[in-house]
Amino acid sequence: MRARRTSPSRRSTLSPPRAFARRRPLMLGTALLGAVAVVLAGCSDVDHEGDDAVAGEGFPVTVENCGEKVTMNAAPQRIVSMNQGTTEVLLSLGLADRVVGTATWTDPILDSLAGDNEGIKRLADNKPSLEAVLAENPDFVTASFSSTLGDGGVATRARFDELKVPNYLAPSDCEGKVADGGDGTRESPASLDQVYKEITQLGELTGTSDKATSVIDDLKGRVTAAQKSVNAQGVSVLYWFANAEQPYIAGCCGAPGIITNTLGLKNVFDDTKAEWPQVSWEAVASRNPQVLVLGDLTRKSQTAETGEAKIRFLETNPVTREMDAVKNKRYILVTGAEMNPSLRTVYGIQNVADGLVELGLSK
């Protein structure tokens, strides 16, 4: 995905999309339990900026978020973002000086945000411990997924509430989605409106609403430009996130569904509402899509994370190497972040549109 960049005319305050070409989580040991207890005890007595500080202009603010009310009495000053998606939203809002920790990354950050991100502490590449989060004395915690902020994650929202730490979960992971112990099932499709809602609400909660509006306007402009750049109605696609043994393939209705519907494509696995079902390679080959959209991840969690590893597998596996898309090397590589509902999904739309044009599939 680093082989080609978009033209300068498409650049803005956010970074250009990644290129078309190459390219999915701890229980503490006994020795740490005492330390955790100390941190928890200390947190319960912390006088957070969001609790008792003198309210600034526009505060207090309350938003409805995934069935809960989140209230900030003042703009937060020590934010911990536990997923890449919310981190990139916060940095896009100009909050680098207020983010004190991040975690759970699949890819490098957007180029335009790299400088701001350099000084921010990485608590963990994957899911952080609750101890690590609380050690940063946060007055606001954000997450992109309930697998991070929920049962089995860093901690539940109720636990953070007990600790008097306001917390926020991306609407795309709760609205129209049912958690099932895995990646979840969509009762209704994810949408860019949910992404825009996240940006808007985080802007309200942090006192950066004007910046949120400009970020959303930029993203909407990118979507419009991508739609105008390609005409590939009905082209069949398959999205592979990771895992060579039993691949995670996109169902109808997550972030890949946003890409598919925006560009008028046909997802060959749109008959399942599971967000990332694991299927057999025989099932993949039987659908025989025209194009393979491959996650080019830099994390090290599953097999076949990078785009290069995926292509190598596809071209050597006896089941997949006979697929039309493989024989004709019709690959489009996108980042893992672009395959999750976030502002990066817009970059995924642009990358897929550009890839379809390069592959000669735009009419």
Image (cartoon, rainbow, N blue to C red):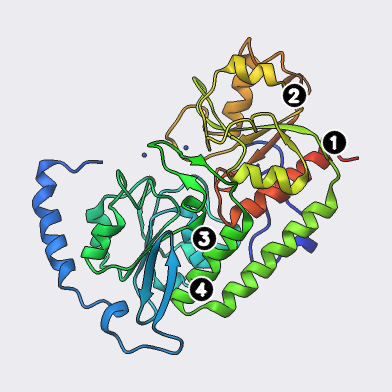
In the drawing, what numbered circle is on residue 331?
none
Q: Amino acid at mark 3?
A: Glu
Label 4 crowd (10 A; few <14 / some 14-19 / many >=20): many
Local secondary structure at mark 1: loop
Q: Is residue 4 visible?
A: no
- The image shows residue 30 at horizontal and vertical percentages of 10, 42
Q: Earlier in the sequence, mark 4 or mark 3?
A: 3
Marks 2/3 in contact by CB < 8 Å: the verdict is no
Which numbered disc, 4 or 3, marks the residue closer to the eye? Answer: 4
In this rendering, the answer to whether 300 lies above or below 150 is above
Dot 4: what SS?
helix
Three-letter code for the amino acid on which mark 4 is drawn: Gly
Q: Which residue is mark 1?
A: 361
Estimate how packed mark 3 is, as few (under 14), some (14 to 19) or many (20 or more) residues with alpha carbons within 10 Å: many
Q: Give the mark, 1 or 3, whose residue is nearer the N terminus.
A: 3
Front one among 38 and 261: 261
Mark 3 residue element: helix
Quadrant of the image containing the C terminus: top right
Viewer-proximal residue among 42 and 71: 71
Label annotation for residue 88: 3
Q: Amino acid at mark 1?
A: Leu
- Cα distance in 3D space between marks 2 and 3: 33 Å
